[in-house]
Image (cartoon, helix red, strand yellow):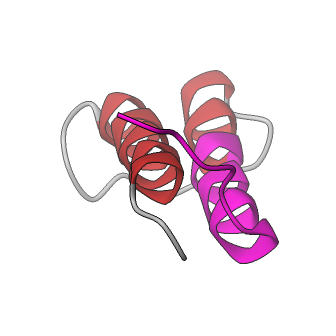
Amino acid sequence: MRLNPPTVVIFLISLVFALLAVVSKYGFVPVPRYIPHQDYWLALIAYVILMTGTVVRGL
């Protein structure tokens, strides 16, 4: 399997989700909790987006 670097847009989307996970976990800014363990799910979504951008060519 050949890995490709993700585009800047995919990287920024992943970064936004990761930052939301950190903010949600440590409470720097009050973020409403819509689901239980929201910080975990946001971090997982950020990782999956970044992984998809790395594996799929052209994303």
Residue drawn at 72 percent across, 68 percent down: 7
Is the residue 24 above or below the residue 15 in the image? above
> Which residues are the magenta region?
1-19
Question: Residue at point 26% right, 30% down?
Answer: 37
Which residue is outermost to the left? 36
Please say whether residue 39 is one of the residues in the magenta stretch.
Answer: no
Task: Give percent across and percent down for residue 42.
Answer: 42, 45
State the residue in front, 57 or 36: 57
Q: Do we see residue 44 in this rendering?
A: yes
Quadrant of residue 9 within the rendered picture: bottom right
Is residue 52 toward the left or the right of residue 53 in the image? left
Q: Is residue 16 above or below residue 42?
A: below
Residue placed most toward the observer, 55 or 49: 55
Vertical relation: 25 (above or below) 58: above
Name the side, left or right, on which 1 lies relative to 58. left
- State the residue lying farthest toward the front: 2
Within the magenta stretch, is there residue 8?
A: yes
User: Between residues 56 and 1, which one lies in front from this camera angle?
Assistant: 1
Majority SS type along the magenta span: helix
Residue drawn at (46%, 38%) of the image: 2
Q: Nearer the viewer, residue 32 or 40?
A: 40
For the point 69% across and 50% down, the residue is: 5
Residue 12 place in picture, x, y as percent = 75, 64
| Residue 30 seen anywhere in this rendered image of the structure | no
Q: Position of residue 33 (x, y in %)?
A: 36, 52
From the image, which quarter does the N terminus lie in? top left
Above-or-below relation of 42 to 22: below
Is residue 36 left or right of 49 when viewed as pictured? left
